[in-house]
Image: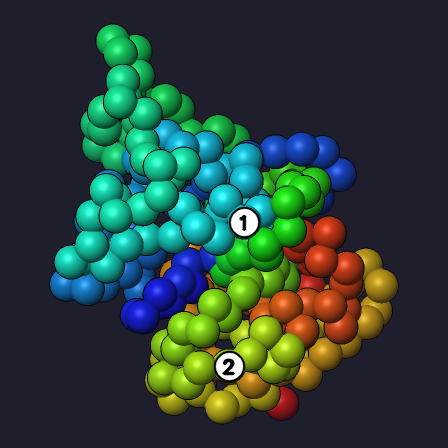
């Protein structure tokens, strides 16, 4: 999610157990700070050009697939993170040679998972992604449905709430549509709808690229409480407590 400012963890959307693409939304999320981060079109194009949508849950994702700060350039990244020399960008989409801009795969409207979005695990295997839900999520009384939990590594970076936490901390990042500084320190109870396993976490960060407003990016420790990391993401129901 936040790298100095935030380190984004790209989230998955899933319903069927099939391989799929996970790409960031075509337009910048509400939390995108143009004064501190690179232009969103630049990030979106590089993300697709180097195949980040296929690297969820890998060390490559953690190293190469997060947005840069405004004072950084892609040339500062390792060679494996460089955009192919025959690829240019047009309106945030990669164009190879004389080809037209690539269409955004029918996968999802990004999310938050480092190595898994988000928000991104450093495992070498790519967890199975799933097809994207059409719903933007819904709420029933105090319970919130329609979202997905993903996970991200802290990498020694401070979250949007200003604190550096270990991967074992039971914390989360809320989608930009919900997040505000006033939520920092608030507890959220999250339940894996597939298994019924629950975890209580503390809001510590913002997720500008979670799949929808009811999706939440978890620390590794929190995600492991309700699912195996290899799952990548799980459908959840949650509430503030």
Which mark is on residue 99? none
* Residue denoted by label 2: 165
Q: Position of residue 92 (x, y in %)?
A: 26, 35
Residue at figure coordinates x 41%, y 36% from the top left: 80
Q: How many marks?
A: 2
Location of the N terminus by quadrant is: bottom left
Q: Dot 1, crowdedness within 10 Å: few (<14), some or many (≥20)?
A: some
> How far across and down, in percent of the image, does residue 96 sit?
30, 16
Image quarter of residue 33:
bottom left
Q: Pick whichever, 77 or 202, lies toward us.
A: 77
Judge left or right: residue 29 versus residue 113.
left
Residue 67 makes an appearance in the image: yes
* Quadrant in the picture for residue 30: bottom left
Which residue corresponds to the image point at 41% horizontal and 47% vertical from the top-left? 65
Colouring convention used in this rendered image of the protein:
rainbow
Question: Which residue is outermost to the top?
Answer: 98
Which residue: 42% across, 85% down? 163
Q: Rate crowding at label 2 as few (under 14), some (14 to 19) or many (20 or more) other CA atoms within 10 Å.
A: some
**Closer to the N terminus: mark 2 or mark 1?**
1
Find numbered disc 1 in the image and state the secondary structure of the residue it sits on.
helix
Residue 133: x and y in percent read 60, 45
Task: Report whether 237 appears left or right of 137.
Answer: right
Query: Circle 2 sits in a helix, a strand or a loop, which is it?
Result: loop
State the separation of the CA atoms marked 2 and 1: 20 Å
Residue 122 left/right relative to 37: right
For disc 1, the marked residue is 59
Asked if labels 1 and 2 touch by Cβ distance under 8 angstroms, the answer is no
Residue shown at 55%/79% (left/top)? 166
Q: Nearer the viewer, mark 2 or mark 1?
A: 1
Note whether 8 is above or below 41 in the view shown: below
Compared to residue 46, the image places residue 76 above or below, namely: below
Which residue ends up furthest to the right in the rendered image? 195
């Amino acid at each position: 999610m936040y790298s100095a400012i935030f380190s984004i963890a790209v989230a998955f959307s899933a319903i069927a157990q099939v391989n799929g693409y996970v790409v960031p939304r075509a337009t910048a999320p509400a939390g995108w700070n143009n004064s501190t981060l690179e232009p969103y079109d630049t990030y979106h194009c590089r993300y697709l050009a180097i195949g980040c949508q296929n690297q969820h849950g890998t060390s490559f994702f953690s190293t190469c697939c997060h947005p840069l700060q405004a004072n950084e350039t892609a040339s500062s990244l390792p060679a494996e993170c460089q955009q192919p020399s025959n690829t240019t960008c047009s309106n945030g989409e990669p164009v190879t040679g004389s080809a037209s801009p690539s269409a955004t795969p029918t996968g999802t409207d990004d999310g938050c998972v480092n190595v898994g979005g988000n928000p991104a695990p450093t495992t070498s295997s790519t967890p199975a992604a799933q097809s994207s839900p059409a719903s933007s999520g819904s709420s029933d009384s105090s319970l919130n449905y329609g979202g997905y939990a993903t996970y991200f590594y802290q990498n020694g970076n401070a979250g949007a709430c200003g604190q550096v936490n270990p991967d074992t901390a039971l914390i989360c990042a809320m989608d930009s549509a919900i997040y505000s500084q006033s939520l920092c320190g608030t507890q959220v109870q999250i339940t894996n709808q597939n298994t019924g396993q629950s975890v209580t976490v503390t809001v510590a960060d913002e997720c500008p690229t979670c799949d929808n407003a009811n999706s939440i990016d978890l620390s590794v420790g929190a995600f492991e409480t309700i699912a195996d990391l290899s799952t990548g993401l799980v459908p959840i129901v949650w509430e503030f407590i």
